[in-house]
Amino acid sequence: MKLTEAVLSPEEMMDAKFSPGSPVVVWLIEDNQNFRSTLARVVNGMAGMKCTHQFANAEDALDALEAGDIPNVVLLDVGLPGLNGIEAIKKIKSLSPTTRVIMLTVFDDHEKVFKAVCAGASGYLLKPSNTNSIVRSIREAINGGAPMTPQVAKSVLDMLSGRSAPKPLATLTTLTNREQEVLRLMSQGCGMKGIAEKLELSYHTVDSHLRNIYAKLHVHTSTAAVAKAMKEGLL
């Protein structure tokens, strides 16, 4: 698997600095050594990012999580030896709910994509993706977005449009008007910053609304919230 390395502009390099403090900690879980090494080099070359761990399987990554190491973002392959990527997402999110998980895979199967999203993935990218798109996806996920390559986004939409019309859940009536507005903006691809600006709310208030939405829909990420809302006819 060859990874296309692209050069980011100075503006994009500066934008990669998520905060003036600690760098964004990225882990890689990928059994292809060449792909893994190249991606680690790219991440470590970015201002504001640091790849601290690389794993060839999910079991070793879970051991590191249980030992107390916590990444901000995990780039995770689906087709891993042993525990597969989709099952690994559930375990990663149970050990570290705040960690963002982005799938990097050759699979664009409808059900695999949907299962990954519902399991807690924050994004889904197809291999090979160039370094520009991968770095932007890390930024987007950290900022509350749901990065997907165009092929994957189309796959999700095709799958959802092909399902029979679901019966709306009573859950919708339990969401406040503001929570419904936040949910609709999430479905349009807005991150937390964008939602705050559009609704003229503080970042903290939007975060509070998102937590309430997650609790009511029984999900852990904005991607899963939108997917479940669309599947169940809430949007």
Image: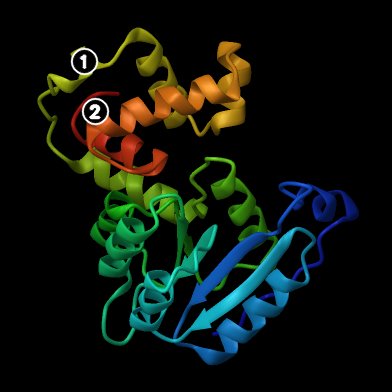
Q: Nearer the viewer, residue 92 or 232?
A: 92
**Label 2 sits on what residue type?**
Lys
Question: Which residue occupies the extreme front position in the image?
Answer: 67
9 versus 194 height, above or below: below
Q: CA distance from mark 1 to mark 2?
A: 8 Å
Q: 25 left or right of 146? A: right
**Rendering quarter of residue 96:** bottom left
- SS of the residue under disc 2: helix
188 versus 161 height, above or below: above
Q: Which residue is mark 2?
A: 216
Q: 173 left or right of 65? A: left
Q: Which residue is mark 1?
A: 174
**Label 1 sits on what residue type?**
Thr
- SS of the residue under disc 1: helix
Residue 58 appearing in the image? yes
24 versus 176 height, above or below: below
Where's residue 223, x and y in %? Answer: 39, 42
Question: Which residue occupies the extreme top position in the image?
Answer: 177
